[in-house]
Amino acid sequence: MTQARKPAPSDLSLVRQWFKSLQDCVQAVDYRAAYPLFAADMVAFGTFSDFVAGRDRVAREQWRNVWPTIRNFRWRLSGVKAIVSPDRLSAVGLAVWDSDGFHAGGARFDRRGRATVVFARKATGRPWVAVHTHMSLFKGTPGRSHGKFGGRAVKSPFGRANPAFGG
């Protein structure tokens, strides 16, 4: 994939919208609302599993081990970058996040990291769907947070269907 130009503003806007939608789901600890943001056959690298295939497994092995243990998760949305394919049907999004982690004794720590997300869609102008994620903490950040927080439902930006793939 070569990138000879800046991404179209609408493509970058939809990448940022994806990150904002995921942020809302993480803050609410709402796994189901996040499902439409990801392809069912996605592949991820993460903290708790080296290599995870399938959205259900990612939710079980990654999201459920992180989301309810942190607070104030937020992407640095103005700094989100995107590399978009010439046909505008695939992209890579790059972003940095900040959040509050908690030591076993309850003390708060800065929990910062970065993500690379590979996106796909069937038509330009449609929302992006993540087919791969790689999220990692910045060097020196504790690998586990010990908070215990419940969740609240958020309205998925896509409803139950996955519009990027015609669902």
Image (cartoon, grey):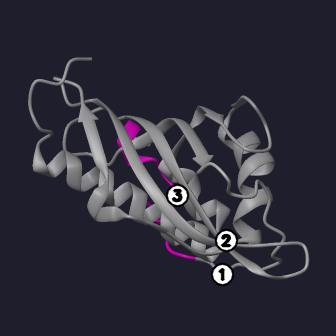
Judge whether residue 144 is colored magenta. Answer: no
Label 1: which secondary element = loop
The one of 23 and 5 positioned closer to us in this rendering: 5
**Placement of 94 over or under 77, stated as above or below:** above
Residue 105 left/right relative to 74: right
Q: Nearer the viewer, residue 44 or 38?
A: 44
Horizontal side of 68 relative to 138 (left or right) equals: right
Task: Using the numbered discs, state the Cα–Cα distance from disc 1 to disc 3 in whole angstroms.
Answer: 17 Å
**Amino acid type at image mark 3:** Arg
User: What is the span of residues highlighted in magenta in the rendered image?
Assistant: 154-165
In the rendered image, residue 33, in percent from the top left (x then y), is placed at 57, 64
| Crowd around label 2: few <14 · some 14–19 · many ≥20 (10 Å) | many
Instruction: State the residue position of label 3.
Output: 160
Q: Quadrant of residue 107?
A: bottom right
Q: Which of the 4 image quadrants contains residue 128?
A: top left
What residue lies at 10% left-to-right and 24% top-to-bottom?
4
Q: Which residue is mark 2?
A: 29
**Which residue does the numbered mark 1 point to in the structure image?**
152
Q: Residue at x 20, y 38 (%)?
A: 124
